[in-house]
Amino acid sequence: MQRTFFQPVAKDAGARLHEAGNGTRGAFMRSKFAHLSVLVVEDHDFQRQVALRLIQQMGVGTALEARDGRNALAVLGQQPRPVDVVLVDLDLPRMDGIEFIGHVANERLANAVVVLTALDPALLNTVRIMARASGMRVLGTLEKPLTQAKLADVLDMYFTADLLADEDPHPDIDEGLLAEALANDAFEAWFQPQVAIGNGFVTGVEALARWSLNGRQVPPARFIPELERTHLIDALTERILSQACAWQRRWREDGMNLAISVNVSMHNLTDVAAADRYQAIAQAAGVDPHEITLELTESAMMHESSNALNVLARLRLKGFGLSVDDFGTGFSSLSQLARLPVTELKIDQGFVNGAATESRNRAVVEASVELGRKLGLITVAEGVRNVEEWQMLAELGCTRAQGELIGMAVPGGQLAATIEKWRRVQP
């Protein structure tokens, strides 16, 4: 088994995590959840009341309940804004939880969902893909009996997700508003560190698009699909790539040599000239394409149109790395993956979270790491939250990690401080 420098501090880090139960942390969590709205959908009266009592004790601002899917849709329809999190049992009368989640996602009645039970754990992946396609996040699953610790862990994920909702709803996002934001350079690249698990050093960052509208952050799930629909996604991708390259050069001048990763949409691959434009952006900033990895979702990467394959091949020829993002949530085959010029697999955080204790998730992570090793690919685990997940990844031989444990995305000017904070927790 692989050992890492992190193991000696596991006790101290674990002690810090254990402090979640003390008064200071408890008060912080109550304050944090005060603006959160949560709907519990559970047909068993006793189980539902237990869940309600627990979330109220945690300081959740708005606690709603429903005994079945139809009743829950009616409750959601009466709310002035989408509910933040829905806790739902899949095995419901009249309308099962999967059909209910489909309605919630399509009608945008909630921002995130937590599955209380899954008769077959493999159902979670299907639910996650279905919900994500409509811009709603599946935070994970909760096994019964519920406890305050379990609920706190899963609800806390809401605040570290890109789909974080604000207290007030955003205005309708249309093509005109997006075009104006692009013209005014309102979209900004923030950066989340990626760490080599073998030695703990920050080796790169992922650039993530952020947009502040009227002083509030707009969740990417709100504007990315609309940019794709209105054919403005190319402009966003090139702006984020340009900003990331400019920051990479500044960091290098300050003595920080960091690779950069930038998300690319399937829509970007329809234009065969995209590879030339990306190369020109990197060259203008003085950045070698070998220091840039372009991330595409698994479903996009497996789209075998002639234009897409043309662009992917030309990007690799120019030196860009290619990453399969959210690996495990799509439907790729080994033959497809082996044929494409990819250099990296990013394991979806839905599998990483809880894998240290859940055998099924661990099996997916282990298989993904082993696949990456056999294909000669870098493996990156997303959403790493705690020492236990880090140690599991180290034992499995995963290459890199990113997530809350290391640091969340920050503006480029704050990256050095974020990296220094990470370094201070090392022995």
Image: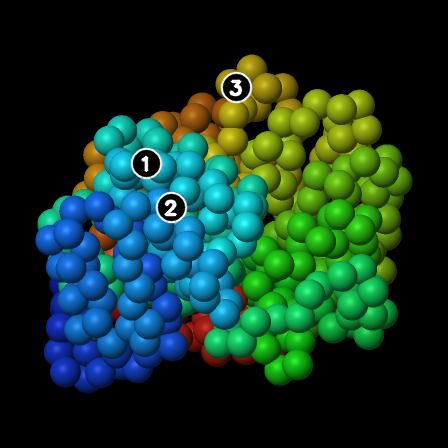
Measure the alpha-carbon separation of dots 1 and 2. 7 Å
Q: What numbered label is drawn on residue 77?
A: none
Camera-side residue: 45 or 216?
45
Q: Position of residue 103 (x, y in %)?
A: 48, 44
Q: Amino acid at mark 3?
A: Ser
Measure the alpha-carbon separation of dots 1 and 3. 36 Å
* Circle 2 Cα neighbour tier, 10 Å, few/some/many (<14 / 14–19 / ≥20): some
Residue at which label 1 appears = 94
Secondary-structure class at tag 3: loop
Residue 173 seen by the camera: yes
Q: Amino acid at mark 1?
A: Arg
Q: Position of residue 134 (x, y in %)?
A: 56, 46
Secondary-structure class at tag 2: helix
Q: What numbered label is drawn on residue 333?
A: 3
Question: Quarter of the image containing the N terminus?
Answer: top left
- In percent of the image, x 57 and y 63: which residue is there? 219
Q: What numbered label is drawn on residue 70?
A: 2
Image height of 338 relative to 194, above or below: above
Q: Is residue 338 left or right of residue 418?
A: right
Are the two marked residues, 1 and 2, in contact with CB atoms closer than 8 angstroms? Answer: yes
Which colouring convention does the figure follow? rainbow
Q: Based on the displayed image, in which of its 4 quarters is residue 155 positioned?
A: bottom left
Q: Position of residue 256 (x, y in %)?
A: 57, 68
Q: Earlier in the sequence, mark 1 or mark 2?
A: 2
- In percent of the image, x 22 and y 34: which residue is there? 359
Measure the alpha-carbon separation of dots 2 and 3. 37 Å
Q: Amino acid at mark 2?
A: Arg
Residue 239 seen by the camera: no
Q: Is residue 232 left or right of residue 202?
A: right
Which callout, 2 or 3, points to the residue nearer the camera? 2
